[in-house]
Image (tube, rainbow, N blue to C red):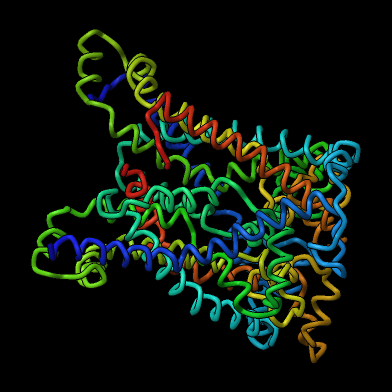
Amino acid sequence: MREYRSKGRTLFHIFNYTFISILLFTCLVPLIHILALSFSSASYTDSNLVTFFPKGFTLAAYQFVMENQMFWQSFGVTIERLAFGVPISLALTVLAAYPLSKEEKYFPQRKIYMWLFLFVMIFNAGLVPTYLLIKDLGMMDTIWALVLPTGVNVFNVVLMMNFFRGIPHEIEESALVDGARQPVILWKLYLPLAKPSIATITLFTFMNHWNSWMDGRIYMNSTSNYPLQTYLQNVLQSSDQVLLNSNNLQSILDRMAVSGQNLRAAQLFISMLPLLLIYPFLQKYFTAGLVMGSVKG
Amino acid sequence: MWKKKKLTSDRLVFHLMIWVPLLFILIFNYVPMATGFSVAFKDYKPGLGIADSPWVGLKHFKNMFLTADAVRALRNTLIIAVMKIVGNLIVPVIFALLLNEVRVRWFKRVTQTITYLPYFLSWIILAGILTNILKTDGGLVNRAIVALGHEPVFFLGSNDTFRWTLVISDVWKNFGYNTIVYLAALTGIDPGLYEAAYMDGAGRWKQTLYVTLPGISMFVVLMTILAIGNVLNAGFDQVFNLYNVSVYETGDIIDTLVYRLGIQQQQYSFSTAVGLFKSLVSFVLIAGSNKLADRFAGYRVF
């Protein structure tokens, strides 16, 4: 593209950079504000004096979160669901995607299976029947209610399938000629080649598990089984009084430093932190994943 | 001969592999679909079990259109979803066009990194942030509004503003991420077209109008068609975490109603019927819009 030098063009550029900067500002300001709140002491947060910088700097709110057993318990549940959920989902995705990536002449029933998978993507069984099923299976209040129902994500299966299809056919054929069997071909050839797309799906699954809260809310009767986001939702919706009482503030001094506001802010920020840490990877692979998903089979 | 034998054993391996994940979706997707279809046409009593509960035909579906709450939820869902579809279409396109004009590389990269960020945060976290900054008494936004000499706005507590708050915050969360596809489309436009337009005396504005816009119009049409399938999805996570009783009038959507009736009040059959109605309509819309997308843009998800 050619560059133009005219008065109108310069004016446009000034407008453009300003406008985009304002948008950037709106994306950052809420996060900075919450961060500032979490480090401010109660007297400032409660009189709404905190804007972008902490006032009356204190770590009291964080200290409280760290000493809060409920917080760690729910953090533990989230870790547990990640530890089970991510590997299970990955294994299931590969097991579905590999056969589905084969052409009809190698796997004649491919189409039927494909439709069985795709149908669940466009027809939702609904909240209540799924809830009744989990109840009937006796999975309420167990980690399996958070892991198994979302075990197969058809979107990820399609993504993985398209990636497998992009791998040159000759690789498989030469292995077949050498006498290799399908499981070996999958394990020794396809999986190592599919590393980038496995990384993408791992991140997708990680993020879904990290962010989901609804299943915790409906399948867990006891609050001690809540995953982090469900616990956080509870915290955010309870009143300041309930929040402070449930945190057993021991001394008068604590009560002066900690308020509902900075306590919520601190919990919000801690819950965001792991996502912010993996964010550079997320961004890279999500974009890559989008491009990969669009490769047509 | 050995080759043929091997082919069949390979097929057997494929079947064995695929049945593991298939079992999962049979149990967790197809079984609830089947129970949904029966519970919605019965008066389900947990004590009796699904099989022994009496059939009531279309009773719950008829009630749905007679219950004020359900009709209101349907109306709110449609209004909110359509507003979101429009916002999530226009803003990313404009933003992509503007970002495409940025020549400073690092600025472009930083912009993308920062604007994608809200997309990755859960609605729990964003709702926590929003309720804080939108508070009437001294929330960040209302402090700015008051400083400019206006009355504070009840963003989350008034029926006049609630829908707009939902739509604007949703667009704000997603606009950065939604530009990805348009930015990709923009880089796909043949630079020769701009050259030719320049030779013909077209300025930057004319080039945008006659080269850039037609170049991405296909994608805009495609995204619009695909969005139609979501017209009954007004965003459960967002609404549930931001609404309260005082804005049910404009903010209660099908999904939140189903949750309240089904899980909290245990009206299993009625809420299943409402959910089933939503699934059926969505199914028709998604299937139809994908067919359209295939016809007009050669786009195939399946």
Q: Nearer the viewer, residue A198 or A49?
A: A198
Residue appearing at x 73%, y 72% in the figure: A135
The residue furthest top is: B200
Residue appearing at x 73%, y 67% in the figure: A218
x then y, percent, for residue B176: 48, 44
Q: Nearer the viewer, residue B276 or A204?
A: B276
Whether residue A262 appears in this view of the structure is no
Residue appearing at x 79%, y 62% in the figure: B51
x then y, percent, for residue B295: 42, 25
x then y, percent, for residue A181: 20, 70
Q: Is residue B260 left or right of residue A142?
A: right
Q: Is residue A288 left or right of residue B292?
A: left
Residue appearing at x 65%, y 66% in the figure: A213
Q: Where on the picture, by quarter, is residue A260?
A: bottom right
Does residue B70 lie above or below A181 as drawn?
Answer: above
Does residue B12 lie above or below A81 as drawn?
Answer: above
Instruction: Count the numbered circles shown.
Output: 0
